[in-house]
Each structure stands twice: as C-alpha cells, then as structure tokens.
Amino acid sequence: MADTLASPRMADPVLTVDHVTMRFGGLVAVNDLSFRAGRGDITALIGPNGAGKTTVFNCITGFYKPTEGMMTLRHRDGAEFLLEQLPGYAVNRRAHVARTFQNIRLFTGMTVLENLLVAQHNPLMLASGYTIAGLLGLPTYRRAEKAAIEKAKAWLERIHLIHRADDPAGDLPYGDQRRLEIARAMCTDPVLLCLDEPAAGLNPRESLLLNDLLRAIRDDHDTSVLLIEHDMSVVMEISDHVVVLDYGTKIADGTPSEIQSDQSVIAAYLGVEDEEVEQVEAEVGV
C-alpha cells in the first residue's frame, strides 16, 4: 500500500523517515523504510516478531545510526533535527524525543515521585549552574526544584498515583509501573514519545487506563506518539495511523480500518500464502 494521508495532520509530519536501511553485517534488519508520523497523531508501528520494529525505534532514538537514509524531526516552531546526525544524548535533550522500553526501567528503590524528578535532572542542573547552588539552596535552584515537583505531582494526579508518591516504585503493580514510566518520559517535555510495547502484560482494566492516558497525551499535550504494539485491540482503538513491517520491509501504511482489511497484513501476521487469505478473512470476521 502506498503512503497515505492517514489524517489531516499528516500534512504537517512531526517525523519523516526517508529510505532508512539498517544493516548488521550481512543482515538487513530494516530495508529502505519510508513513512511519516503526523503531528498530534498516535502512529503505530506493527508487524510480526523479528519484523524490525525495535531496530527502527533504536534508529529514531539514537541507539543505532542507520546505514542509509534520513530521519527528520520537526518542531512546531519550524526547527528541524536530522536524528541520524545527532549524538545519542542530543536526540532527547535537543530534539526532545523520549522513549520507553519493552522491559520496565524504573528506579525501583526510589520513590514514585523521585522517579519523575530524575527525569527533570537536566533543567535542575541548568538552574544550579552546574555548581553547588542546589546544595546551598539558592533562589534560582529553589524555583526550578519547586517547578519540577509541581510537574511531577501533576503527572501523578493524571495517572492516579498521587497517593503512592512516597512509596518505592518497585512496590507498584505492573500496570501502574507502566503508566509511571510513561509519565516519567513525559516529564522531559517530548515532542515525540516513542513507546515500545506499552500494553505488554497488562490486564483489560490496565489496558483501558493506558488507552485513556495515551489519548490524553495526544489531545491535551503538544506531543505526538509513535508506538510498537502487538495488542491489536489497543492499536485499532487508539491509533490514527498504522505502519506495518515484515522482515524489515514496509508492507502497508494507512488508517487502522485500511490495515485491518489489508490482505498482505493478514498473511504476514498469520503466516499464510496469498491464496489462503480469503479463508483467513472469513475466519476472523474481516
């Protein structure tokens, strides 16, 4: 399927991936991938295991440098960043791209509140002048610290965890830890939030809470979302735009309804030959 304007906001893409290829020796993990993520959209990157989704994330977020291609992030004010040319730390600090991982990476021994304050380390250090101003409690640092605490508490209110602010993060149920990790990423004020399988391991109630949170991030904050997800109910429920990979190659790109009925997607997910697709469609009710 050709690239499609999945929403009107696709005319103003926050992220443009142009002909990106990632090779590891003789292995081509991502092959000539191009797609756009619309500003203010939730864009899902899906595909069977081994399709290259996490490799794409690692390229976008600075963990890998692609072998070929360009990845352009555009801020609303017109600033542009070529992500493949930035050092890894600058993808977050300058381009304002944040991510979470398949495995939760909270500081489990720190409190819930402290996890959100750690995410604001850079502005706090800037306010301290990279000196002992924080230890001395100088006014500039105190103001920055107060703002950081207020932001952290606002996110804890949003994810319904303010009553657990002083508890160790490791004591939270799994679903709460997932939402806390997303809130921590949001404390960095990202333009693009990359989520790697945020619904993995969640029960139905936790999935609903996650869906509500991601919609709020899209609708109430100036943040676009790019997610990898295997839970198709989550993808179809909240995504504005879906890109499908198989063996590192894009096989479909469109709205959730277009993807849901795409024969090549069904074949890739269920491992069937093209001539079997109509039978599979009938079985799954497409």
Image (cartoon, rainbow, N blue to C red):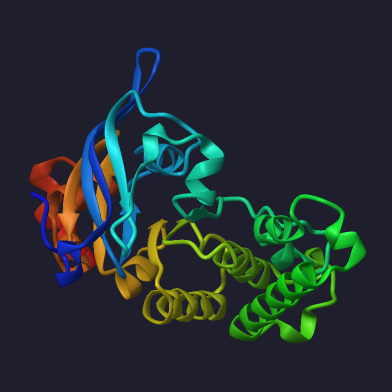
Residue 162's place in the image compared with 283, above or below, is below
Horizontal side, residue 141 vs residue 83: left or right: right
Furthest residue toward top: 26
Estimate the x, y position of residue 81 in percent, counting from the top left.
35, 45
Horizontal side, residue 84 vs residue 137: left or right: left
Identify the residue at horizontal 45%, vertical 75% (top origin): 217
Residue 17's place in the image compared with 191, above or below, is above
Residue 80's place in the image compared with 28, above or below, is below
- The quadrant holding residue 154 is bottom right
Estimate the x, y position of residue 279 in percent, counting from the top left.
13, 56
Q: Nearer the viewer, residue 206 or 101?
A: 101
Q: Is residue 226 visible?
A: yes
Estimate the x, y position of residue 233 in percent, counting from the top left.
36, 70
- The quadrant holding residue 22 is top left
Q: Nearer the viewer, residue 181 or 236?
A: 181
Identify the residue at horizontal 34%, vertical 39% (top origin): 51
Horizontal side, residue 61 vs residue 132: left or right: left
How many numbered discs?
A: 0
Q: Is residue 109 visible?
A: no
